[in-house]
Amino acid sequence: MKELYKLSEQLTHILAAGEVVERPASCLKELLENSIDAGASLIDVKIEKGGMKRIEVYDNGKGIHPDDIEYVFERHTTSKIKSLEDIFSIKTMGFRGEALCAISSVAKVTLVSKHLEEEQGCMVKVEGGKVLSKSFCPFKKGTRIVVEDIFYNTPARLKFLKSPSTEQKYCLEMVEKIAIAWPEISFRAEADGKRQIFTPGDNKIESVIGSIFGIEIVKNLVEFSIEKESLKVWGYFVNPTVSRATRSGYHFYVNRRYIKSKLFSSCVDEAFKNSVITGRFPIVFLFVQIPPSEIDVNVHPSKLEVKFRDEQFVYNTVYKAIADSLKSEKMIAKLDLSKVDDANDAELEHKHIEVLSANSNDISLVISEQPNFFEMFSNEPREVVIEQQGFENFDAGNYKIVGYAFDTYIIVQGDDSLYLIDQHAVHERRLFEDFKGQIYSSNVQSQVLAVPVVAQLPSSQKEFVLSNRSIFQKMGFEIEDFGKNEIVVRTWPAILTKSIDKVFLLDVIEMVYEQMVGDKSLVGISEDLLKRIACRAAVKGNSKISDLEKKEIVELVLVKKEIFHCPHGRPVVVEITKKDIEKMFKRIV
């Protein structure tokens, strides 16, 4: 009995589309690359409902000739390669001739284009891979393509897409990533009728980075470059004093093509391992120019990966370029006198914060009106002045605080043992438990900021935050649109800190996005996310705390016996018995 069947042409197109068109953002990527190959100096993008309803891309490039326009939707029709040798010397963004075929197989497409040698435009409508009509019409220079109802004929694939806000973020991120490599092109992006991205097209990468990430990032850019044989490596990293909680700040380009690369990620991690705080990641814009014959860009369906002929050589060159700049005088911090006023403002803001809580004792580790852990979490170090109370005044059963090591470990003497208690681990666990309890009981206590905090975000992140404000509100953050690429934070979770830290806010946004991926339900706020926030907010090692706070910690661990491990499972206290000490000194055997 015959068991093998040849698939229909329509089915093979749909299956092939699954490799090229994973989501609206991958569809947009292919359209943008076509516009770049057309020699455009302006690319205008409009998306609706995260690109699921509609994606429109206009460019002022050379256009498509009427004799070719319907054939661009056929599989493997391209002007980029003509022979086997061309595959190993690809200089264009697109080359396989399958993007529009794949897109039109799973969407409704309208293409209007005017070739630079023609007097009028030509319009083609395609649905499900079939050309429905072709007609001539008035049209200005360039090409406009509209993709509607993506995956309308493959509902099984449609259900795997995320929420519109998440898909919108993916689309805007794609525009941002491609725009960085093409500063001579002006990119404009609009989402649901609202302008999100605008790059000037002045051929300056710093201008693109500034328009996307803000002027503060541009001020902290450090340039690096190196040239070895036929390999040229150059780019920018942001001074490591500005870092991220994830690798979202890694931007890699090979021959101006944005890629994902474990090789480059490993290289950057290694280069910065002694320059960035553990658990933090730098912001890097890495560009590699290499002869096309030395790479294979055809190893990934969406061309998001490349393979190098000599990976070790590339790795070593990239590493040297970054490492040398990390050792240069460029890394010397410059005194910014404007920060003096900012510090005063922050101090004034700190004094005027109003805590919205009828019972302040519910806030972690508050001891009467004495300074607490939250006052220790601040950008600017400051001395905490309290009435000095000696350790001998600590009365908690048989325990007595006898020392404090490395501004991290509290040394406690019991009847027959010494105990070392890690202040960070204890505070982290207390924050985690209290914050988790407040969130899952929908009773997060917030504090109103007398001076609201304004933060600048890339358009993709800003729209994600605004679309998911309810999630952040459940965590105690009241966030509003502040125009352009800015948001304003009006309330802050009281349990975390009384000092507002913009870097911490950016970390929370990144962590929420990474953990939740568009999930608008309370379930989406996972324990893992809360652990990371608690760790980020907890008082650190090498940070002095008051005697009263030391006593509170000892009571939590040894008297009340409430905390023995941090949220990650590490111990908060270590016991050394008197017998162990006597053995070390050979007093007993």
Image: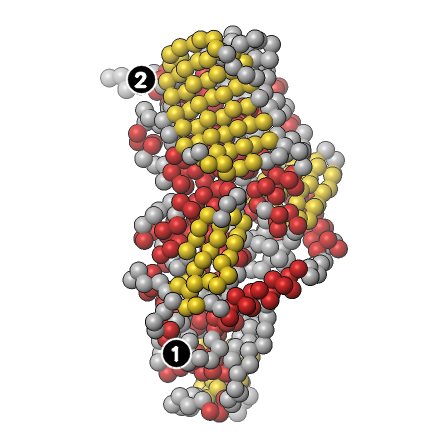
- Residue drawn where x is 27% and y is 17% of the image: 2
> Toward the viewer: 248 or 169?
169
Marked residue nearer the N-terminal end (2 or 1): 2
The amino acid type found where label 1 is placed reads: Leu
Within the image, what quadrant is residue 3 found in?
top left
Q: Position of residue 537 (x, y in %)?
A: 48, 64
> Toward the viewer: 101 or 361?
361
Left-right relation of 1 to 546: left
> Toward the viewer: 342 or 250?
342
Quarter placement of the N terminus: top left
Q: Position of residue 60 (x, y in %)?
A: 57, 21
* Image mark for residue 5: 2
- Residue drawn where x is 48% and y is 34% of the image: 190
Q: Position of residue 525 (x, y in %)?
A: 36, 54
Left-right relation of 522 to 51: left
Packing grade of label 2 (10 A; few <14, some 14-19, many >=20) is few
Q: In this view of the protein, can residue 531 be seen by the observer?
A: no
Q: What is the residue that sits farthest to the left in this orientation?
A: 1
Packing grade of label 1 (10 A; few <14, some 14-19, many >=20) is some
The amino acid type found where label 2 is placed reads: Tyr
> Toward the viewer: 475 or 311?
475
Say which element carries label 1: helix
Residue of label 1: 556
- Residue drawn where x is 56% and y is 13% of the image: 115
User: Which is more foreground, mark 2 or mark 1?
Assistant: 1
Say which element carries label 2: loop
**Label tally:** 2
